[in-house]
Amino acid sequence: MKRWQAVAEFVLLAAVWGGSFLFMRVAAPEFGPVWLIELRLVLASAVLVPLVMRQGKWQVGLTLWRPLLVVGVLNSALPFVLLAYATLTLPAGLTSILNATAPLFGTAIALIWLRERYSVAQFAGLATGFVGVVVLLGWQPTLDTSGYGLAMVAGLSAACCYAIAAPYVRHHLAEVPSLVIAAGSLAGASLVLLPLLPFTTPEAMPSAQSVAAVVALALLSTALAYLLYFRLIAHLGSTRALTVGYLIPLFAMVWGVLWLGETVTASMGLGCGLVLLGTAIANRPVKLPSKI
């Protein structure tokens, strides 16, 4: 892959993933979080599962259905529903900033759970990111404040789910092709949400705009995004590919302003900057002292 192609795909990935918060913001009020995410998972699975079968890797997914189901719950079903719930109250840009705290949670989990070693600078990064979260929590939306606290908790909980899923994947599915993990986990997540559908039926027939948002969410921000992400991992490495998370809030806020007329406040900008700065510092590789 040429450099300009990698840059173009990198920016495109950030744009479509940032767009997911816009699409959820549009469709969640009419579909409800559960139906919205179930449709997202089913449509995306319908694109990715045939690709796995075409490559002859479907047997791998069947053999590892248990860990794939766990990943589906932790990395798709639960965080997707939580983020969709958050968008019922919060602007798309703010929800994306909360989602960007996932690497901070991941660093904290690695420190406490996996007992990894961290430098003073990385601790400072955690503290900086935490201050950014506090700034966001203190921000009061200009629209409807009812449910604001629960929405913030939902967004942060979704980020925490992503942080828990990452070491699980590394421990149980390290040698499994990324496409198999994506397709298998999405399909498993869709099965998990099925029993909830009768209890969360939309009150009225969703509008054409909401239906279009669901299709875009599934095909662009899920299926296409996964394919782009895996392609970047193959050509740039996982570390560089992960840095796409720094651009997602920027695109989410831009889409929110352009399409929904949302307002980017000074507190949102400050909180976002602190979260991303803290994340960048906290995720710097640790240079361990050489043996004497």
Image (cartoon, grey):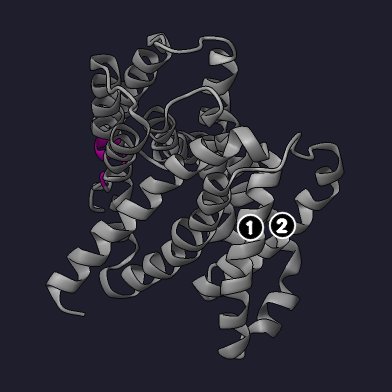
Residue at x 28% of width, y 37% of height: 258
**Percent of width and height locating residue 80:** 59, 44
Bin the neighbour count of mark 2 within 10 Å (Cα to Cα): few under 14, some 14-19, many 20 and up: many
Image quadrant holding the N terminus, namely: bottom left
Q: Which mark sits nearer the N-terminus, 1 or 2?
A: 1
Residue to which mark 2 is pinned:
190
Q: Is residue 194 left or right of residue 181?
A: right
Helix, strand, or loop for circle 2? helix
Between residue 128 and residue 183, name the one nearer to us.
Answer: 183
Q: Disc 1, disc 2: CB below 8 Å?
A: yes
Q: Which quadrant would residue 169 be assigned to in this image? A: bottom right
Residue at x 38% of width, y 64% of height: 229
**Percent of width and height locating residue 292:** 23, 52
* Amino acid tagged 2: Ser
Q: Main secondary structure of the magenta part?
A: helix
Can I make out residue 27 in this image? yes
Q: Which quadrant would residue 247 be assigned to in this image? A: top left
Between residue 146 and residue 228, name the one nearer to us.
Answer: 146
Residue to which mark 1 is pinned:
41
* 175 lies above or below 284: below
Residue 175 is marked as none
Between residue 80 and residue 173, name the one nearer to us.
Answer: 80
Q: CA distance from mark 1 to mark 2?
A: 5 Å
Helix, strand, or loop for circle 1? helix
**Percent of width and height locating residue 186:** 63, 61
Residue stretch rendered in magenta on the structure = 280-284
* Amino acid tagged 1: Leu
**Percent of width and height locating residue 36:** 64, 46
Can I make out residue 173 in this image? no
Q: Is residue 84 magenta?
A: no
